[in-house]
Image (cartoon, rainbow, N blue to C red):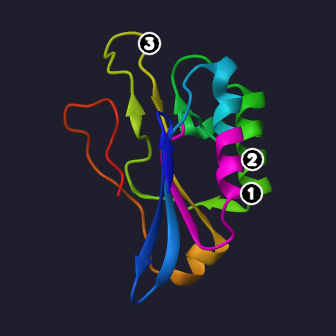
Amino acid sequence: MSGSLHYIDSKIVEDIYGTWRFSSIYGWPEGSEKWRTWDLIRSLAGQWDGPWLCGGDFNQVRTNDEKVGGNNPSVAEMDSFNDCLMEVGMQDLGYIGYKFTWENSRRHGGYIEEVLDRFIRSDAWRDKFRNARVLHLDKLRLDHSPIV
């Protein structure tokens, strides 16, 4: 359907489940630019009213317990992300596996882990795929864990 450096938007057509949408996201990592990710999600939501799954690296935690180490997460940034998801009717699918999906790989001093990667879904997508589960796989040599 469309794309840029920060997203790929696809329409999936299946015989069994019909048509649904998948959007892959790479959120702006800079605090001063995070609003662009939320505007992107809002814009994508406004283009489709059917089942929607969205996944990727949102570069944002949703709650304090999604980060260990470093400075406390910004409450304003967490609130903005959560408000955006509520506004567009998307919910986190949760996960099976190790909680954190990103680490800064510093073993001595300054070690940080965060949940940055996730899948979110609309209620219509959940209704189609009731048995869907998200798996956090083991990191190999990257700073992010693969999620499927």
Image coordinates for residue 38, horizontal then vertical, percent: 69, 40
Give the residue type at disc 3.
Answer: Gly
Whether 123 is drawn above or below 48: the answer is below
Residue 88's tag is 1
Q: Dot 3 corresponds to which residue?
A: 110
Please tell me which residue is depicted at 48% across the width and 84% down the height of the picture. 18
Disc 2 crowd, CA 10 A, few/some/many (<14, 14-19, 20+):
some
Seen from this angle, which residue lies furthest left?
140
| Residues at circles 2 and 3 in contact by the CB criterion of under 8 Å | no
Give the residue type at disc 1.
Answer: Val
Image coordinates for residue 3, horizontal then vertical, percent: 49, 44
Magenta part of the chain: 39-58
| Residues at circles 2 and 1 in contact by the CB criterion of under 8 Å | yes
Between 37 and 76, the residue placed more toward the observer is 37
First-in-chain label (2 vs 3): 2
Q: Dot 2 corresponds to which residue?
A: 84
Q: CA distance from mark 2 to mark 3?
A: 30 Å
Please tell me which residue is depicted at 59% across the width and 19% down the height of the picture. 30
Give the residue type at disc 2.
Answer: Cys
Residue 140's tag is none
Please tell me which residue is depicted at 35% across the width and 36% down the height of the picture. 144
Describe residue 127's horizontal placement relative to residue 36 as left or right: left
Whether 21 is drawn above or below 39: the answer is below
Describe residue 134's horizontal placement relative to residue 79 as left or right: left
